[in-house]
Image: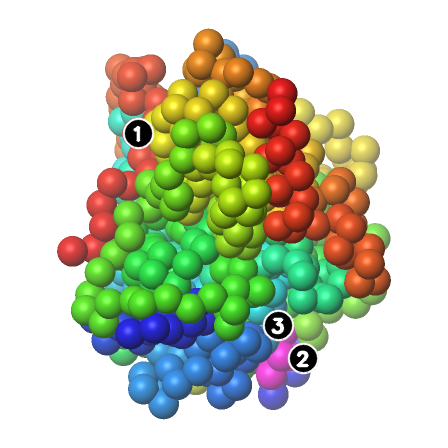
Amino acid sequence: MTAPQARTSDKPNPGLEREHALDLLRQMVRIRRFEEKCVELYSAGKIRGFLHLYIGEEAVAVGAMQALEPGDAVVATYREHGHALVRGIPAEKIMAELYGKQEGCSGGRGGSMHLFDAATRFYGGNAIVGGGLPLAVGLALADKLQQRSRVTACFFGEGAVAEGEFHESMNLAALWRLPVLFCCENNLYAMGTALKRSESEVDLCLKATSYEMPAWPVDGMDVALCEAAARRAALAVRSGEGPCFLEFRTYRFRAHSMYDPQLYRTKAEIAEWEKRDPINLFEARLQEQGIISSDEIAAIEAAVAGEIDKSVELAEAGTWEPIESLTRFVYSDRTRP
Amino acid sequence: MEITYLKAINEALHEEMRRDENVFVMGEDVAELGGAFKVTEGLLDAFGPERVIDTPIAEALIVGAGVGAAMLGMRPVLEMQFGDFISCAFDQIVNTAATLRYRHGGLASCPIVIRAPSGAGVHGALFHSQNPEAWFTRVPGLKVVAPATPYDAKGMLKAAIRDDNPVVYFEHKRLYRSVKEDVPTGDFTVPLGVAQVRRSGDDLSIVTYGGTLHQALEAANIAEREDGISVEVLDLRTLLPLDREAILAAARKTGKVLVVHEDRLTGGIGGEIAAIIGEHAFEYLDAPVRRLAMLDTHNAFSPPLEEFILPNTAKIVAAVRDLWAY
């Protein structure tokens, strides 16, 4: 059994290929800028409802997704814009979904918390904390029963650890050695409740290892370490060794949702974490190592800005679902012949 | 061949698993033990442990994992050992399964069946006696069925397994071995959403389903024999979607409707049926729609108390006479 101690975060930078490094940076910037645009659009009343920003946590989704192949599956949470973008759902389909337009990836039916795309095997955001874990177990079970060697990556926050479904799912995945990569994004606060106020045991890896599941913590602000850990875990999962649990230690820079007075944490604490902004950290490292120039960073920013502008344009031009189709897809008329 | 209600369910599982390799059965003690009521007996031997799967006691996980597998084209039949335990899976049924297709713009399917042995009259006390169907009959996206006969139990389970929607299948455990019927051996299905007139009559209609169907039929015979009242009995069979036309036809035909169910009175499907009739067949009525249901209390363990709170044949006969005299 793997002891719950740092096993990757003490390793040096694994030496990234230049192109790959640029892509990691580009993906993180895409998420950051996309969500910054979302904030603007929210203030303008273009996006409504609930909007949970991933800003600060980008390294986790970007790093972890590197370990996945096109045939693998992803299950995410209500804070899933980043995962959806990295997984390859076109930005305009995500933006249109956030608008509630029928051109959205879920037909405008779900909005921010319910992004879905079968083509990229993105089996949904989920607005119930912990609700996605049993689904991931089921996806992996189907893969195992149908003898496919695929991984299901299941993202969830540390708040989900308090849910019974977390424990039910961890137990069964381990018992049946199902190919699930459990990616716990520990941003320290379940909405406004600090981990130490809600868990008797705050070492999350210990919970996983109690189910005989290999588990280790990862510096979730370092995209290279996130990738390395996910690759190592995914390799084990893919080779049939059963599930793995990664605790990505990260931090949400913004409010839980759009309105949140953030009385549960201090400005100083936020500022301290912002010093480890995953994008700044990685950018600085790449510049230091001479891997990337300021011009190239500017080029990435420009390309990302173009993509986001286009996504807004398409979302704006999108159409509302007609009232006549209100009950469409509540039921299927199909039966298996 | 004459088979029990329980055997009918068992046969449906065997036949659908033979028919479609994507069908599998999952739940607590369904494999090695053959189910707490032996409903899944023989499946493990016939289909092996990959398709007949014992799980830990984790109802939310059973349903949630079923939904995940269904998204990849499998057709899981998930057993809640007792219908009462379905409350532990409520979130996965109501939030996840029921909304899956709608939520994803029609791009995902959730062909799962959740079997739930329900019903009182077996001295099961508070948590092994309930009829929780009304928790689900107001949830769009679900289908809710409650067959009362072996023929329907078999035909509707087969239809439910082939249906592309999540179906909650309530099987009344008092019927398991008490009801027998000739059921054809060949392949057949009974369509979901279609009620069935079980007994034709002109004076008064009983609308019922599940465990109380047999009591209603018995009561109808007594009322006819002893009082000369001609009673029609409509078996709803499916509670979501309701067969509104059949309900309205029964009301229009006799002008007097008694709804009978073993679920509690308040918030039970009987209230909805009365409302449908009141809204759409008011001018045909010769009396207010009456309801006979379990009292609004907890399922009692004490035999005289359980007897007191549940509908039975004598109470249905009395209600029929009362309504007839209106």
- Residue occupying the point 62% across, 50% down: B313
SS under mark 2: loop
Residue kind at label 2, given as amino acid type: Ser
SS under mark 1: loop
**Of the numbered discs in the image, which one, if any, rests on residue A88?**
none
Q: Which is the main secondary structure of the residues drawn in magenta?
A: loop
Residue B50, horizontal then vertical, whole percent: 36, 82
- Residue occupying the point 62% across, 33% down: B321
Which residue is the site of mark 2? A210
In what quadrant of the picture does the C terminus of chain B appear?
top right
Which residue is the site of mark 3? B57
Q: Is residue A234 left or right of residue A311?
A: right
The residue lying toward the viewer, choosing from B270 and A5, is: B270
Whether the residues at callouts 2 and 1 have beta carbons within 8 Å, the answer is: no
Q: Is residue A186 left or right of residue A122?
A: right
Residue A240, horizontal then vertical, whole percent: 38, 83
Residue kind at label 3, given as amino acid type: Ile
Start-end of magenta stretch: A208-215
